[in-house]
Amino acid sequence: MIKKIKKPYKFNEAKKKKLLELLKSGLRRGAAAKQVGVTPQIVNYHRRNDEEFSRLVDEAEMEANEPVEDALYQAALSGNIIAIQVWLYNRDPDRWSDRRSVRLGGEEGQPIVLKVVYDNENSDKI
């Protein structure tokens, strides 16, 4: 059930355009909404009820990612191992993934047994 917002007109075309510009510049949805004078809930209401606006929000957020992706790529090219891993893991996960498998266990795969030892002389300090 979609809750009706009392004053959806508050989020007019000019405010939508400004919100999209802010998203393209890298602001998050909540901060961008606040800056144009609406709540994040109003933005979400319009996204649910306006497919074109929802598409434009997605595009604006993707556009904001482009400089970060470019910086990641440049860092990978310069030899930054973490950047290389992130780039490859995300661009071609079928070929590149972290295949480490870390498991903790006791002897022969049994559960780990913890033993708590109290120091009787200093038990009032524990």
Image (cartoon, rainbow, N blue to C red):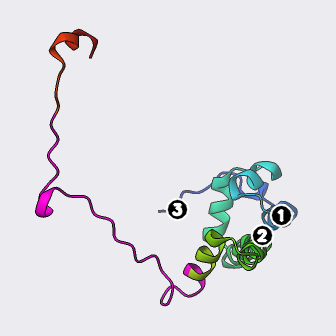
Badge 3 element: loop
Amino acid on which disc 1 is placed: Ser
Query: Could you say which is closer to the camera, residue 50 or residue 33?
Result: 33
Relative to residue 18, is residue 63 drawn left or right? left
Near-viewer residue (93 or 58) = 93
Amino acid type assigned to the residue bearing label 3 in the image:
Ile
Residue 24, given in percent of the width and then of the height, sits at: 81, 68
Name the kind of residue labelled 2 in the image: Ala
Residue 4, percent across and down?
Answer: 59, 57
Image quadrant where residue 89 sits: bottom right
Q: Which mark is residue 64?
A: 2
Which numbered marker is on residue 2? 3
Q: Secondary structure at mark 2?
A: helix
Contact? badges 2 and 1 (CB < 8 Å)? yes
Whether residue 49 is visible:
no
| Magenta segment | 89-115
